Image (cartoon, rainbow, N blue to C red):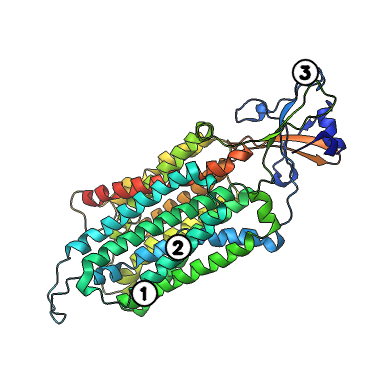
Amino acid sequence: MLRYDTMDDDQRGLVHNEQPTAVNDDDDDDYAGGFVAGGGGGPHDVEILPAGENDFHNVELHSHIQISDAPPDKWNYTYLVFYFLGTATMTPWNFFITAEDYWMYKFRNTTLNESTHAEEELTPMQKSFSCDLTLTASISGTTFLILHAIYGQKISLRLRMQGTLVLILVIFMLTAGFVETNTDKWQEQFFLITLLTVVIINICSATMSGALFGIAGLFPSEYMTAVVSGQALGGIFTALTFLMVLAFGAAPNTTAFIFFSIGIALIFLNIICYAIVERKNFFKYYVEGGDKFKIVYDDPTHSRMVDRGVALEPNIRDVLSKMYVHAVTILLLYTTTLSVYPSVTILMQSQDYGKGKAWNDIYYMPVVNYLFFNSGDYLGRIISGIWGRPRKNVHTVLLMVLLRMIYLPLFLCSNSTQHIFLPVIVSSDVAFIFMMLTFAISNGYITNILLNMVPRYLIFCRKQRIIHLFWFYFRCVMQHEKEMASSIMAASLSCGLAIGSMITMLFVQMI
């Protein structure tokens, strides 16, 4: 609690009506507290009361004060761990779903003679597995991201991070153990076990992702950029691994074992890295509330500040009222992306398909659909972290998302042998690659913009013994609401993934 008798001269000057100087500086690291007047989101929300109105002998002084004294992030270790944890939010699951040939092999028709060269029909389990996998993952993941946004702060951070990572590790080890296990005689039971593991993995991933986005929101904005960039980097790593396995032509069991083994190693390393980072003073400072605002009062019946400060607690209704446009925008963004990627885009073929060239027949679609998209997504997040415009108008970002929907009819009418109802408008490989790259870059760019636009705070510091005020007018929630706001954004993103996954089923039938 901030007490009058522990204040330095500059802080006492703030109480004794010495007027701060308003500045306009984008240096996030130089500032740390101030007055909050009103609840809007612009620079005019900073109000310096005249001396007669804020005399603490006449009226009660009521201010939100944030004093920052964060230790250094030595060797940028915390930043690098956030990057690494970002890869863990999606990469293990990407490996799980990339092993499609393995799942088709596990659920094949085992009654047919393997020497028969006749084309065998898909079994009911093979036909339904992809759909069941998508629905199971979407429902369980989205539900628990929403629950985490509401109740997550009531559970210890260590349990949400370390506990879920350990459980994902156990599930992946179990899944890897099934690779060399003959499940032909109990396929139905194995099918149910697989869906159960999918539920557990997505519940754990949703909880861990919500916690990671929440705590990243407590740190400076570049740490949130590290998390979202790590997600895209994980996608690139998955795509490269898939292409390497494809080049060697490994059997489905071998491919799956490689995927699951890499996933196990990645999760294990994340557990170790997080165990180390949670002991760092820099990490503890932000996670334990070093920069949280407190309300400080002055009692007019006393001659000095009274210790009646209370820590501010976030209220989900208040937070949603400030950021619902941001939540809707990121939901629409990922609904648009998932409605065509990857289920629709993977059906597209090279204009020279069938001419006997390995690039056109084997590598074109994996490279363009997975490697190019994830690389573009990663590039967009990096550009956003460096430049980051627009920063203050979420309605401009919403307009960008709505304009981005022009890609939907273009992808639906791209070159594919699957077309039955829609015409082919985009047949050129160059045009399709350009569409994929710009679609991916815009996805990454807007994602990072939205996730960094949410936190807002008023700050106060000492620089050359002058107190400055500065309002981060382009952000929309207070410091103590940042963790909940970031979790809500993660939940909205997941809702967009779920809705997009359902729409894509309709789009595939439309083609």
Rate crowding at label 3 as few (under 14), some (14 to 19) or many (20 or more) other CA atoms within 10 Å: few
Going from N to C along the chain, the mark reached first, 1 or 2, is 2
Label number found at residue 53: 3
In the rendered structure, the answer to whether residue 377 lies left or right of residue 246 reads right
Going from N to C along the chain, the mark reached first, 2 or 3, is 3
- Amino acid under disc 2: Leu
Decide which of 159, 426 is in the foreground and name it: 159
Rate crowding at label 2 as few (under 14), some (14 to 19) or many (20 or more) other CA atoms within 10 Å: some
In the rendered structure, the answer to whether residue 479 lies left or right of residue 371 reads right
Mark in the foreground, 1 or 3: 1
Which residue bears the numbered disc 2?
A: 167
In what element is the residue under mark 2? Answer: helix
Q: 447 above or below 171?
A: above
**Distance of mark 1 from mark 2, alpha carbons?**
15 Å
- Amino acid under disc 1: Gly
Residue in the picture at 69% in, 28% down: 46
**Distance of mark 1 from mark 3, alpha carbons?**
72 Å
Which residue bears the numbered disc 1?
A: 177
Going from N to C along the chain, the mark reached first, 1 or 3, is 3
Decide which of 419, 39 is in the foreground and name it: 39
In what element is the residue under mark 3? Answer: loop
Q: 122 above or below 397?
A: below
- Give x and y (percent) for residue 400: 46, 40
Residue in the picture at 35% in, 48% down: 498
Can residue 377 be seen here?
Answer: yes
